[in-house]
Amino acid sequence: MDVYKRIEELGYTLPPAAPKGGIYKPVKQVGNLLYISGQGATRNGEPVVSGKLGSDRTIEEGQEAARICTLNALSALDEYLGDLNKIKSVVKILAFVASAPGFNSSPKVVDGASKLLMDVFGEDRGVGARSAISTNELPGNISVEIEYIFEIE
């Protein structure tokens, strides 16, 4: 299955790679693993979904934020690899969800990212290990930030 075709079939397009927000590499390769720096719910460096889940944002809005993070990660990978079809599997995602006190549904929010990866790569390749952490603040008041680890051929 062609990854680009699948993204298009799902109704998505890859955005331009996000501009860097500090001193780091967007993608760091170690052996056949690619570590993707935290990707926020931004477009062109500007927040798309901001505020805290549980007070300012709904779970559904958080899931959309998680999908935006994932599309940004795929853009960073595309820029680094030149071909997303080289991805063998999703190894892990580590997600941070800006949460109001008492909000304990971060895993439901992060399902937005997990489902998109599963839909793009299939269940065997697209579902990896995962952590969903609630936090009080994220950069630029974004609602979700996610790091990724991918395995390549």
Image (tube, rainbow, N blue to C red):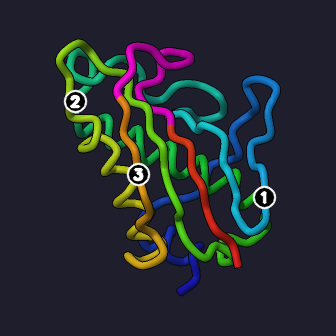
- Secondary element at tag 2: loop
**Which residue sits furthest bottom?**
1
* In magenta segment, residue 52: no
- Secondary element at tag 3: strand
Q: What kind of residue is marked 1?
A: Val
Query: Does 86 sit above or below residue 76?
Result: below
Q: Residue at x 60, y 55 (%)?
A: 149
Residue 21, numbered circle? none
Q: Residue at x 48, y 75 (%)?
A: 125
Q: Residue at x 54, y 34 (%)?
A: 40
Q: What kind of residue is marked 2?
A: Thr
Is the C-beta separation of discs 1 and 2 under 8 Å? no
Going from N to C along the chain, the mark reached first, 1 or 2, is 1
Query: Does 150 sit above or below residue 133?
Result: below
Going from N to C along the chain, the mark reached first, 3 or 1, is 1
What is the C-alpha distance between the residues marked 1 and 2?
37 Å
* In magenta segment, residue 141: yes
Which residue is tagged 3? 130
Q: Is residue 11 left or right of residue 13?
A: left
Q: Split into 4 quadrants, where in the image is the C terminus?
A: bottom right
Q: What kind of residue is marked 3?
A: Arg
What is the C-alpha distance between the residues marked 3 and 1?
20 Å
- Of badges 2 and 3, the one in the foreground is 3
Q: Residue at x 80, y 40 (%)?
A: 25
What is the crowding at mark 2: few (fewer than 14 residues within 10 Å), some, or many (at least 20)? few
Residue 58, numbered circle? 2
Q: Which span of residues is magenta-colored?
A: 134-145
Which residue is tagged 1? 30
Q: Is residue 148 left or right of residue 44?
A: left
Q: Position of residue 23 (x, y in %)?
A: 82, 26
- Of badges 1 and 2, the one in the foreground is 1
